[in-house]
């Protein structure tokens, strides 16, 4: 059964409505489409129309049939880093450190995770000032909990500390260091290690994401050519994703974005012409909506966005969204509600569960249209 989760009282951290449902383990994609004998664009595609609740089941390779000439696909060109590193405490405890978000002054948000036979789990008992050893003679010093609003009281921090602001001491540039010593962030539902190439999209141009902007994973050069021949435009932006392992009570953290002037112009022109703007991924929605005025005009911009999109804040720049299947009670579902409404989203997710769609970064995709 799929249920609405209302926004709790404002004195709690979770300030979003969402959906709650049971996700069976067999619907968690444990390997890339290629390992299942498919091309990347062979993953399943569920097309839903929120104005009349129509639902179509097809494959991503047939996406051009649902996008019209003059429509704009806005894509995220951020590439995925080898953002996971082996780490160790002074007492010898092995950990995994996940590089998340670059901050000013060349500091980083990092996540600490403990090792277990079932995969990694959040690690909560690190201390301010602690130094962790990293491969190749590098180290990470924990400066403060993240976000900064988390203050320590007489009984300790307001909630268990999972994310930290850290100062990294590396023997070379971060890109070179991660290329040599890092590996892709992997959660327990992905049973095997896969090289970083499996975590890159065809759109990737600059490294910076802790985890893959996965809505774009299924696109292939051949699919892009077919979309172009149909008269569909693509417009790039950058949003470097942080770690996706948010706890249920946590809202999304700030992320770096950059929306070029040409992309803003392309989106505005399409909207003025009555064409649709379709975001490829929730990262694109967050970046675009950050630079959109109340009148619906998109401006170029660059910085860190803290925007949280819920049904209480309507979308101003986006008409449609291509996205993966999202976990129960996640903030991404609140964003989808803002676009499609809770009733339509509940209907769509019930259908996806009944039809056996696959979840997570290697899973199937959902196209939400008017």
Image (cartoon, rainbow, N blue to C red):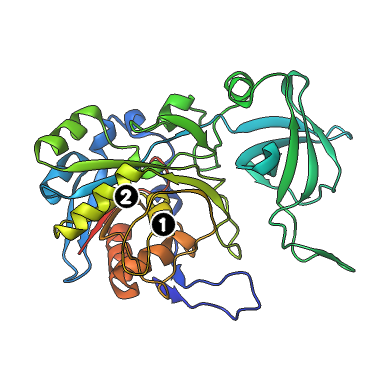
- Residue 363 seen by the camera: no
Q: Which residue is mark 1?
A: 291
Image quadrant where residue 167 sits: top right
Residue 202 located left or right of residue 140? left
**Residue that appears at 39% across and 36% down:** 77
Q: Secondary structure at mark 1?
A: loop
Q: Position of residue 365 (x, y in %)?
A: 30, 48
- Residue 94 seen by the camera: yes
Front-most of 349 and 184? 184
Pointers 1 and 2 in contact (CB under 8 A)?
Answer: yes
Q: Position of residue 270 (x, y in %)?
A: 19, 53
**Residue that appears at 41% across and 72% down:** 313
Q: CA distance from mark 1 to mark 2?
A: 9 Å
Q: Which mark is residue 264?
A: 2
Image quadrant where residue 230 sits: top left
> Which numbered disc, 1 or 2, marks the residue that appears first in the sequence?
2
Q: Quadrant of the C terminus?
A: bottom left
> How many residues crowd around disc 1 within 10 Å: few (fewer than 14), some, or many (20 or more)?
many
**Residue that appears at 14% across and 57% down:** 273
Q: Which mark is residue 20?
A: none
């Amino acid at each position: 059964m799929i249920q609405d989760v209302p926004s709790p009282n404002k004195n709690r951290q979770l300030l979003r409505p969402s959906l709650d449902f049971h996700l069976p383990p067999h619907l968690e994609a444990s390997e890339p489409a290629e390992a299942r004998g498919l091309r990347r664009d062979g993953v399943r595609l569920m097309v839903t129309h929120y104005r009349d609740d129509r639902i179509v089941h097809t494959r991503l390779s047939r996406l051009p049939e649902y996008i019209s000439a003059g429509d704009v696909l806005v894509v995220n060109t951020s590439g995925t880093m080898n953002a996971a590193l082996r780490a160790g405490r002074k007492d010898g405890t092995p950990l995994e450190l996940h590089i998340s978000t670059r901050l000013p002054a060349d500091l980083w948000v990092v996540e600490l995770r403990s090792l277990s036979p079932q995969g990694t789990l959040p690690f909560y008992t690190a201390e301010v000032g602690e130094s962790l050893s990293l491969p190749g003679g590098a180290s990470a010093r924990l400066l403060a909990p993240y976000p900064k609003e988390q203050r320590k009281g007489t009984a300790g921090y307001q909630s268990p500390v999972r994310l930290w602001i850290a100062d990294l001491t590396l023997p070379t540039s971060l890109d070179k260091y991660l290329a040599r010593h890092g590996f892709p962030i992997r959660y327990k539902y992905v049973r095997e290690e896969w090289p970083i190439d499996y975590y890159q999209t065809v759109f990737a141009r600059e490294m910076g994401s802790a985890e893959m902007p996965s809505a774009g994973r299924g696109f292939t050069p051949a699919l892009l050519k077919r979309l172009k021949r149909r008269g569909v435009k693509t417009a790039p932006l950058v949003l470097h994703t942080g770690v996706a392992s948010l706890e249920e009570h946590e809202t999304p953290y700030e992320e770096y974005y950059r929306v070029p002037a040409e992309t803003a112009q392309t989106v505005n022109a399409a909207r003025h012409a009555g064409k649709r703007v379709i975001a490829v991924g929730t990262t694109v929605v967050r970046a675009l909506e950050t630079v959109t005025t109340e009148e619906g005009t998109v401006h170029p911009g660059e910085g860190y966005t803290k925007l949280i999109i819920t049904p209480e804040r309507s979308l101003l720049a986006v008409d449609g969204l291509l996205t993966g299947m999202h976990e129960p009670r996640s903030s991404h579902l609140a964003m989808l509600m803002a676009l499609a409404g809770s009733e339509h989203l509940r209907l769509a997710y019930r259908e996806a569960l009944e039809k056996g769609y696959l979840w997570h970064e290697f899973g199937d995709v959902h196209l939400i249209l008017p």
